[in-house]
Amino acid sequence: MFRNQYDTDVTTWSPAGRLFQVEYAMEAVKQGSAAVGLRSKTHVVLVCVGKANSEFSSHQKKIFKVDDHIGVAIAGLTADGRVLSLHMRSECIHYKFLYDSPLPVGRLVVQLADKAQVCTQRSWTRPYGVGLLVAGLDETGPHLYQNCPSGNYFEYQAFAIGARSQAAKTYLERKFETFPECSRNELIRHGIISVKEALAEGKLNGSNCNVAVVGIGEAFNTLDSKAVQQIIDSLEDRADEPPVDVAPVEGEQGAVQDDTDQAAAPMET
Amino acid sequence: MLAAAQKDEKKDQALKNHVGHPQTGRDCPFTLLNSPISHTQYPYVTGTSVLGIKYKDGVLLASDMGGSYGSTLRYKSVQRLKPIGKHTLLGAGGEISDFQEIVRYLDELILYDNMWDDGNSLGPKEVHNYLNRLMYNRRNKFNPLWNTLVLGGVKNGQKYLGTVNMIGVHYEENHVATGFGNHLARPIFRDEWHEDMTFEEGVKLLEKCMLVLLYRDRSAVNKLQIAKITEEGATISEPYAIKTHWELEAFKNPATGAVGSW
């Protein structure tokens, strides 16, 4: 995109009916490192590449737990992402206090989208420069949503955002039809493989790869870096072999015991 | 125009011995200037007991249709059981106007819930918790909604029965009652209620307790309704009366043991 005379203000339309400031905000999302989300009938998995400023610094925190049943992966302006996560946590806690029940994911996502929309219609606030992949479980089943700076939201079976996300999406496109029936561990493996595609240089390891899962019988939790390393190693060993069922790795709480347990979720109607 | 109206108001106030309260600034009778600010009410038109039990297919609620004005049985067609959304029934004892207000709050809550139109809905547990927040908050402001509420419902096969009162005490149980029902009906429930009663058994049990209440509760009237809620939805019966028996020997010749002096 090139600079033009309609892009200074978010409150200025272009003659083609575009809001350039909003589109520039979406560009900021593309600058962030990749985040991938994928969903089966029972689980949702988020996998991210966390960049590090230098060899000495810690890796970027890209995944935030919002509630026991919802988590979010961000790409773009991390500070904006952090602030939105805080807002989401507050919404979830408030709902729980009023109704003693977990906030349905779809409703949280809409509230978030409405909040983002406000910034596209005021001259004194800028749009949020962060894209979110919201993974959650409610009584209608597991869900994966994407939230944009534009205030749009979409539900997905699998999606990727951030730098080189197209490469990840290409892998997901090949495999996504198998996802509904995937076991928890297969799903994690698919997530890590797709994120590998989005890596430009260097290798994926337990420190720069963040993995989080939420599912039926499993509260939202981020996998231990050792556990992630184990999965990455096992991928290398097997190369292009089809994924084989492996017992849940160390460090997860309340993980589904049996990989082949594909009984319909109580929420499924 | 506005200034003239305000001036008139001031004149009226002065005539009626009203002043602005030094703390709140609001209108206040002169004679109450030195009393503490308090909103605690007294109930005016009240409903008596509500009974609730779980049964095989869901929950049954029972109440009479009386609205007492102190010790007078003033109103005899007050519906004290109301459906809330698809999944819940609410019954109330206590101040009827406060119950009507609560129903208004809940109808609004359900309306906004329906407007999401997203496959999610508030179930009885959520409504119960919301009510508890409402009642407890009002209690903290010393301005309670003067009710004891019974909330029953079914969602996704799960039966739910609970109660909340004006001070925010709340709990779930297999059988609940308000007011006199706690003293007269609960003991009968404890003896005779069991899991998975049929609809007929449930109604029989409730009617037995309503009969005891009719005999012994002075604010009870012989016009009652039984409401049922199952996975399919809520139904409230048409009002009906139960048979009472007065053929006791002691009633036949009331003056036998007490010869008058004139």
Image (cartoon, rainbow, N blue to C red):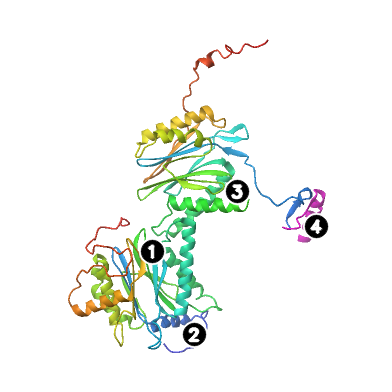
| Both labels 2 and 4 in a single chain | no
In space, the residues marked 2 and 4 are separated at their CA atoms by: 55 Å
Q: Amino acid at mark 4?
A: Lys
Tell me the quarter of the picture where residue A71 sits. Answer: bottom left
**Looking at the image, which residue sits at the far left?**
A241
Q: Secondary structure at mark 2?
A: loop
Report the span colored magenta.
B1-24
Q: Secondary structure at mark 1?
A: loop
**Pointers 4 and 3 in contact (CB under 8 A)?**
no
- Where's the N terminus of chain B, which quadrant? bottom right
**Pointers 2 and 4 in contact (CB under 8 A)?**
no
Q: Amino acid at mark 1?
A: His
Look at 47% across and 79% down and name the residue there: A79
* Nearer the camera: disc 4 or disc 1: 1
**Horizontal arrangement in the rendering, residue B246 relative to residue A174 (left or right):** right
- Where's the C terminus of chain B, which quadrant? top right
